[in-house]
Structure formats: C-alpha cells, structure tokens
Amino acid sequence: MIGPMISSVASRVNYWRQVGMLKGIKFGGENKYLYYKPTEAEVDQIRQRRQKHGVQPTGLNHRDEAQ
C-alpha cells in the first residue's frame, strides 16, 4: 500500500525504509513491516531524490487523483 503513495513499485519501499525515508515496524516473519503513512514532506523528498537519479515514477500520483 505504501508503494502507490510514493509513486513507486513495492520492491523499492524496502530501499526507502533502509535509507530512512520511510518508517516501519517489523512484525511477523521475515521482511514484514507495518509502515507509518509518509508525510507530504517525506513523499516530496523521495520524489526529488528519485528525479535526481533519473528514476521515473510508477503508478498513480496521489495528488492527481483528486483532480
């Protein structure tokens, strides 16, 4: 569920958690996390970092959904 919030594929959510951009609590088995909803500032920072490295966003931009 976090992937669409940050316009990224699910496999990148783990990366953003490891670098400290997303906050999650480990639970259950291996590689299972319950994530806090990212703030707008965190989402913007992830997008800026991705653009700096030339990675194109995937999925929907949640800001565009309300328009």
Image (cartoon, rainbow, N blue to C red):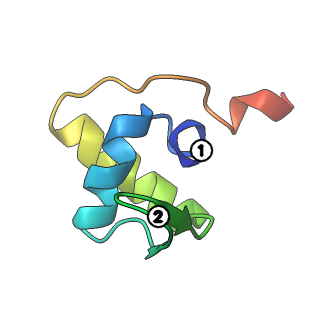
Question: Picture quarter containing residue 64?
Answer: top right
Residue at coordinates 15% horizontally, 37% vertically from top-left? 53
Q: Secondary structure at mark 1?
A: helix
Height in image: 13 above or below 59? below
Q: Secondary structure at mark 2?
A: helix
Height in image: 48 above or below 54? below
The residue wearing badge 1 is: 5
Residue at coordinates 19% horizontally, 41% vertically from top-left? 52
Is residue 61 shown left or right of residue 43?
A: right
In 3D space, how far apart are the residues under numbered discs 1 and 2 (Cα atoms)?
Answer: 11 Å
Q: What type is the residue that disc 1 sits on?
A: Met
Closer to the chain start, of discs 1 and 2, is 1
Percent coordinates x, y for residue 46 in the rendering: 37, 52
- Viewport quadrant of the N terminus: top right
Question: Picture quarter containing residue 18?
Answer: bottom left
| Residue extending furthest toward the front | 29
- Residue 64 numbered mark, or none: none
